[in-house]
Image (tube, coloured by chain):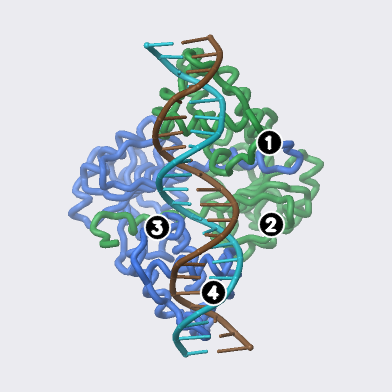
Chain colours: A blue, B green, C brown, D cyan
Amino acid sequence: MRYRKIPDETVRRLPAYLRGALHLSQTGVASTSSKELADLVGVEPWQIRKDFSYFGDFGRPGVGYSLSSLISQVNEILRLDTRHKAALVGVGNLGSALLAFPGFRTYGFEIAAAFDIDRRKIGRRKAGVLIEDVAVLDHLNARGVRLGIITVPEASSQDVTDALVRTGVKGILNFSPRRIAVPRGVKVITIDIAMDLAHLPYYLPGNRR
Amino acid sequence: MRYRKIPDETVRRLPAYLRGALHLSQTGVASTSSKELADLVGVEPWQIRKDFSYFGDFGRPGVGYSLSSLISQVNEILRLDTRHKAALVGVGNLGSALLAFPGFRTYGFEIAAAFDIDRRKIGRRKAGVLIEDVAVLDHLNARGVRLGIITVPEASSQDVTDALVRTGVKGILNFSPRRIAVPRGVKVITIDIAMDLAHLPYYLPGNRR
DNA sequence: GTTTGTGAATAGTTTCACAGCA
DNA sequence: TGCTGTGAAACTATTCACAAAC
């Protein structure tokens, strides 16, 4: 395989392939094909083969893919082979739900710290995580935290972002419906739930466009 | 403007433009430019002009865009000019958070019904919404509900989907980390929080790819 | 025969640059 | 002059089709 720039879309799909591979692996089978994996995750087989082709030879023609090597290779590409610690800021409704959310563990994530501004919450625990005062949001670097999850009201999302970046956070999962500015070298992924729902009616039957 | 197929990416960006326009409108100004709106939502000005150009003439050269007409036109394109009722299924941590989530209202959505399987929850109210037995999930069509929000564990997401589709739901916002099968004419948008986080480490500094 | 890996073809999206209107 | 609207160019991603490997 020759080097080519890896499409962002390919990187975005890799976690889905990983989940599919983990699922198959748990059922006890040792190998799979692009067809089987494609049906499982809901894409076309050639898409999977093409995506994998950017990273080298994953499978064996006529045979398929070994699940164990597929899983370890994708884990390594996505850098999920080391555990990642995240700090969650904003223990409101959504923040609380995410603290209790089991899905992060699938990919080796751990919410290692939680922060809020509300005195009544500070000092308590939610889903086993101590809620700390957002005013002392620092030293995260020393605690091994490099990811941040922002679930605060939009008015304070930029302040929280700045604080996270100051303490060494390099990746942010942002749930607030506002564009947040970060310096070069920090990657932000925004999940704007209302906005995602907002383009659904466009595709409803009866639309004349 | 001549007719051309409207890119999905354009439709995906429209809610952001709408939010930006609403925000500016609330500050009291009456008009804006592609430059100002672009800075606000974090895209480039030509992107906005190009996106709007698919739908007709929105602005006036040398002047800009009238916010009130921009808002009503985008609302109409996205079909947000009528209120949309949604049924939420699965009142767990995430479901509860979404019931209390104020963001849906920005785009005219209302969670008009909630369902769960847990006897202890059925009959209670969360954020003002009565929790009903998922076993009686039907007649939603008669209640004017055309959208569904799925926040159940992945094992039951397909069953819930089938029930929603049977009762006339045409659009689904799916939070379960599983591909759900729907008949033609039903649109699904999946938000897989763990998966979105999973591709973040790839972009962290220090990655050699 | 089966299934991968991948160039080439196609499709889709972004960016540019500028004509034309206010 | 200022700003929109849009063809054309550049770029990116998807799909195809098939040679090579097992």
The mark lying in front, picked from 3 and 2, is 3
The reply to whether residue B36 is in sight is yes
Q: Is residue A83 above or below residue B189?
A: below
* Mark 3 nearby-residue class (10 Å; few <14, some 14–19, many ≥20): many
Image quadrant occupied by the N terminus of chain B: top right
Residue located 73% across and 54% down the image: B184
Residue located 56% across and 70% down the image: A45
Pointers 2 and 1 in contact (C-beta within 8 Å)? no
Say whether disc 3 or disc 2 marks the residue closer to the N-terminus.
Answer: 2
Name the kind of residue labelled 2 in the image: Thr
The reply to whether residue A26 is in sight is no
User: Where does label 4 land, which residue?
Assistant: A34
Say whether disc 2 or disc 1 marks the residue closer to the N-terminus.
Answer: 1
The mark lying in front, picked from 2 and 4, is 4
**SS at circle 2:** helix
Q: Mark 2 lies on which chain?
A: B
User: Where does label 3 land, which residue?
Assistant: B199
Name the kind of residue labelled 1 in the image: His
Instruction: Give how far across and how far down residue A16 sits, in percent.
Output: 49, 64
Q: Distance between the residues labelled 3 and 1?
A: 33 Å
